[in-house]
Amino acid sequence: EPTDTLYDVIEKVNQAVEQNKGEEKSNDTDKVARFFHILPQFVVSFMVWVIKWKDNHNLMPKSLIEVSPFHSSFFLTDLGSLGISPVYHHIYNFGTNSVFIAFGTRAKEQVVDSELNVSKRKAMDIRIVIDERIVDGFYFATSVKLVLRLMSHPQELLTPPKEVFVDDEI
């Protein structure tokens, strides 16, 4: 929600992760994937062709969009949980996902401040791939600067905004 704080988002993400964690858990996306897995390959190929055609012509059924990981604002993956570094992932020419974010294992790094004092801090590598076809480079650069500022000063996300501006053009 536009008025959510960082704590609200953390709670919602943790709830979603817990609902889907574990091999015994199943969600609608898993059910669709299992359905496609049991079909013969030629049927799957034909169905994928039909789905891609419908997606290109804005005719995708809402039920498929809701279970598709490709129809989202961004894709976030935790490769650190696998014990590996993040990767730059390609953007698919399918769906609406135009931002792919991957983060890896946590580590300690040494940093030097402006007075040449050395200290250790927690660190994590992040890789971001953004589809340049959706907006211009200036907008992306401004957005990345904002994200980096908020990551450096997360306390700004602890209180809800004083005002939420609604863009009726969207």
Image (spheres, grey):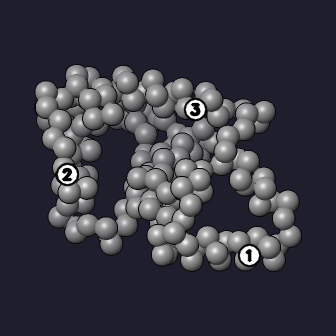
SS type, badge 3: helix
SS type, badge 2: loop
Q: Position of residue 170 (x, y in %)?
A: 25, 55
Residue positioned 60% across, 38% down in the render: 81
Is residue 74 visible to the viewer in this orientation of the structure? yes
* Three-letter residue code for mark 2: Asp
The residue tagged 2 is 168
Q: Position of residue 83 (x, y in %)?
A: 61, 41
The residue tagged 1 is 45
62 versus 4 height, above or below: below
The residue tagged 3 is 17
SS type, badge 1: helix
Q: Residues within 10 Å of mark 1 (few under 14, many from 20)?
A: few
Quarter of the image where one finds residue 110: top left
* Three-letter residue code for mark 3: Val
Instruction: Indicate which label's residue lies in the foreground, 2 or 3.
Output: 2
Q: Residues within 10 Å of mark 2 (few under 14, many from 20)?
A: few
Cα distance in 3D space between marks 2 and 1: 40 Å
Q: Position of residue 159 (x, y in %)?
A: 22, 22
Instruction: Indicate which label's residue lies in the foreground, 2 or 1.
Output: 2
